[in-house]
Amino acid sequence: MGKTLAEKIWDAHVVHHEEGEPDLLYVDLHLIHEVTSPQAFDGLRLSGRGVRRPDLTLATMDHNVPTTDIDRPIADPVSARQVDVLAQNCSEFDIPLYPMGDANQGIVHVIGPQLGLTQPGLTIVCGDSHTSTHGAFGALAFGIGTSEIEHVLATQTLPQRRPAMMAVTVEGDLPAGVTAKDVILGIIARIGTGGGVGSIVEYRGSTIRSLSMEGRMTVCNMSIEAGAKAGLIAPDDTTFAWLEGRPRAPQGSDWDRAVEAWRSLPSDPDATFDKEVVIDASALAPYVSWGTNPAQTVSIDDVVPDPASFDDAAQQEAAARALRYMGLTAGTSIRDIAVDTVFIGSCTNGRLEDLRAAAGVVRGRRVKDGMRALVVPGSMLVKAEAEAEGLDEVFTAAGFEWRSAGCSMCLGMNPDILTPGERCASTSNRNFEGRQGKGGRTHLVSPEVAAATAIAGRFRTPSDLDTPVSSGGAG
Amino acid sequence: MEPVRVISGTAVPLRASDVDTDQIIPSDWLKKVERTGFGDGLFESWRESSDFVLNQGRYDGASILVAGANFGTGSSREHAVWALMDYGFRAVVSVRFADIFRNNAGKNGLVAVEVDAATADALLDAVEADPSLEVVVDVEGRRISAPAADIDAAFSLDDSVQYRLLNGLDDIGLTLAHAGTIETFEARRPEWLPRTNS
């Protein structure tokens, strides 16, 4: 019987197998950052253990770093201590580190791919749930906890039960204005926040194959929002073209050997999945989340749903609680909701293609008076590339703030936060209560919708900006 | 890790589904570099409301949390498990746990008790009706019971997690017993695989 892509990678990394026990898997690449690693290094010191493979480990600072005045020390002493501790740990254990201010610094899931470290067929782990991003290259990549970080540091392996295999197949052409972000929001809305629990999701079908690498990263990034262990996409010529020539990608004859190996990775035609979901791309739309979990999403053409419209009591309760927190009334048109702030960035949508798409919408236009609008490149390299194309000038001329790289307003661990009640159209991945700052109200959208919303002050698509929208007030 | 065999005590009903780890411990607490002291941050935002269940004196001293489906979704932060344990919980009951949360729980000796929907509902109803109800989580027998409420049900728990809980074993020590196999595996890895330091 044939094997799936994930099964091939899994089987090639089993160091030790024993009936009834989890497989001991080898880890090809371990990415670390300042937030989830300090207690793991402490554990190593307490037990007198070292780091087995510093040459397969890479660290950066992303969650705590401010995105302005990065040449000055971090003002918050607790954040400052956390990044200092990472620097000390990396120095003590010889782990390469891209610190704040370095040309290669950035969000851990943006820098791995751009360096060419993220490659097809690898096992990649990181103490961060959005590690699934790297699955876009046909790697098996998943988030781990701090105890597991310590385990990987000490042994370069991880005991893991083999998850179930799930296929999410999206077929057909995307309607105009529908992006990779909408593909994954649409998938989560259909399978739910628990739809992928216990599974590795392989995204398949013509729609997925037609996506760029950046789009594929956006899709795989939010696999965890459907509860999946990991998400991945078969490597193909799009993958190889993106990787070739990157600093840590194989070079010369190694490149040819690598590509030959990578071509054998896609799932065999007779491979079977434990579960399959098929989605028609023509049914997808630009989505806006209305609630406090990433499955609580509707089309921008829709209205805020009535909690009573949900099937079971738990969902009704969750919807009612979400509407209270979000300050929304059932039946309100999404386009009528006034927004205070727009955030473009994060490991979901902070890459060059995302910034190009947003810049294309705001070029020659102005952010609505009184709104706060931020663009935060996912890495310092993305920032430099965007500036070389003049995107920074497009954004600042439109009234956006142009920042340095970091997780920024995705998660409220650095100075970029919402105030209580502040409503944000955000290209990030989580709309949980308080995620972007205590009391903040997050609506997940694509970069294109975020950009158009910054111009109009209410939820809009780029095409809305060219044609008057009847609903809503000031538009 | 200390061995965990049986947990018995009172329980707190948390009638909410999709409790994400940002709610369990807000991100501001993640700046700490220690493993201890997270109990004060447990459900920090929800605890600001006086009617939140943890603020109700009748549930003081409970060691078991009974929650809605999909507990521990979102961020991988192990701090969520540290916060629950630092506060005094030894087991969490739900119909479904997020994968990373369940892994993190097992590594720290917090028992993730995965039950069917009928058992979860019965437990929620029972502990809401009687906060002094004694609930017993038997790790060895993989059963959860509340005899006074006539509840007795099996729960699922991975064999290897159960073995580690019962014996209080350190995973890293177990893996290092295979150090030779790891070395053999490493010797076979293709040369062109990426390094972070070259």
Image (tube, coloured by chain):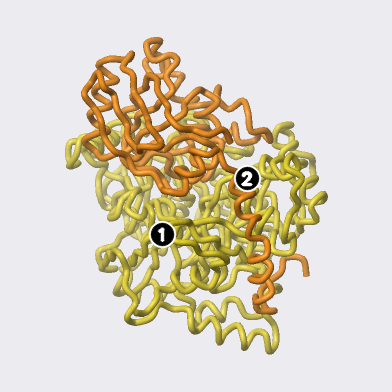
Chain colours: A yellow, B orange
Q: Is residue A190 left or right of residue B53?
A: left
Q: Is residue A338 left or right of residue A237?
A: left
Look at mark 2 in the image and give the residue it sits on.
A63
Looking at the rendered structure, the kind of residue marked 2 is: His
Q: Which mark is residue A126?
A: none
Residue at point 62%, 66% (across, down): A28
Q: Is residue A446 visible?
A: no
Q: Is residue A140 left or right of residue A303?
A: right
Dot in front, 1 or 2: 1
Label 1 packing within 10 angstroms: few (<14), some (14-19), many (20+) = some
**Chain holding disc 1:** A
Residue at point 77%, 45% (across, down): A48
Residue at point 66%, 52% (across, down): A32
**Occupied quadrant, residue A234:** bottom left
| Outermost top residue | B57
Q: Is residue B161 left or right of residue A382?
A: left
Looking at the rendered structure, the kind of residue marked 1 is: Pro
**Chain holding disc 2:** A
Is disc 1 placed on a helix, strand or loop? Answer: loop
Look at mark 1 in the image and give the residue it sits on.
A163
Please tell me which residue lies in front, B48 or A3: A3
Q: Is residue A117 visible?
A: yes
Is disc 2 placed on a helix, strand or loop? Answer: loop
Residue at point 57%, 69% (across, down): A122
